[in-house]
Amino acid sequence: MRWLFLLLVVLNLAYYGWSQQDAPVRVKEIAPLSGYKGGQNDIRLLSESQLPAGQCVYLGGLSSQDSAALERRLSGLSIGFRKARLPPPDLALEWLRIAPADKAAISGSALQKLSSEFKDLKHKIMPCEGIATGE
């Protein structure tokens, strides 16, 4: 009986040692980022920020048929646009440049609705000048 008791004690000690190997490592404390004052004081979404002067919003990346449907949809929303031709990689796809007065109207929820209606719709914010247009 004494040997059985000693065997159980040794097995318990072995099990305790084995279970301590899987114990979680102590959490290392990390300083919060609130003390860091880098180039930006806060994070803003693109839809919340004002576009700098000379920047335009482009919608597109669609085929001709889908682009025509997008034009009808934008006309229904009273958003001004005109066709634009982007540099060679996007030559086969059609793009629309949103009128500067309607930049605010196309941001946020309106852009999300359009993206849900048109599966492949892309938007870009690029300089207005220096892009070859279809004019």
Image (tube, rainbow, N blue to C red):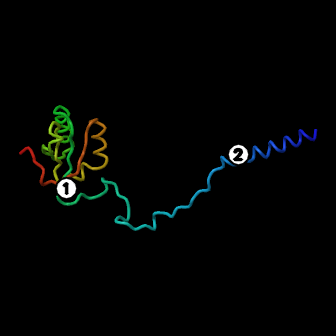
Q: Image quarter for residue 96? A: top left
Name the amino acid, label 2.
Ser
Residue extending farthest to the right is 1
Numbered disc in front, either 1 or 2:
2
Q: Image quarter for residue 51? A: bottom left
Please report the residue visible at 13 percent of the width from the left and 43 percent of the height from the top.
85
Residue pointed to by mark 1: 55
The picture places residue 65, in percent across and down from the top left corner, at 17, 31
Residue pointed to by mark 2: 19
Q: In the image, 91: left or right of 24?
A: left
The picture places residue 128, in percent across and down from the top left corner, at 15, 53
Q: Are marks 1 and 2 in contact (CB under 8 Å)?
A: no
Name the amino acid, label 1.
Gln
Please report the residue visible at 30 percent of the width from the left and 54 percent of the height from the top.
46
Please report the residue visible at 28 percent of the width from the left and 45 percent of the height from the top.
111
Q: Quadrant of the C terminus?
A: top left
Q: Quadrant of the N terminus?
A: top right
Q: Measured along the vertical axis of the image, is residue 56 above or below residue 122?
A: below
SS for dot 2: helix
Total numbered badges shown on the rendered structure: 2
Residue extending farthest to the left is 135
Q: Nearer the viewer, residue 74 or 46?
A: 46
Earlier residue among tags 1 and 2: 2
Q: Residues within 10 Å of mark 2 (few under 14, many from 20)?
A: few
The picture places residue 102, in percent across and down from the top left corner, at 20, 51
The picture places residue 93, in percent across and down from the top left corner, at 17, 37
Please report the residue visible at 23 percent of the width from the left and 51 percent of the height from the top.
125
Q: In the image, 4: left or right of 30?
A: right
Q: CA distance from mark 1 to mark 2?
A: 61 Å
SS for dot 1: strand
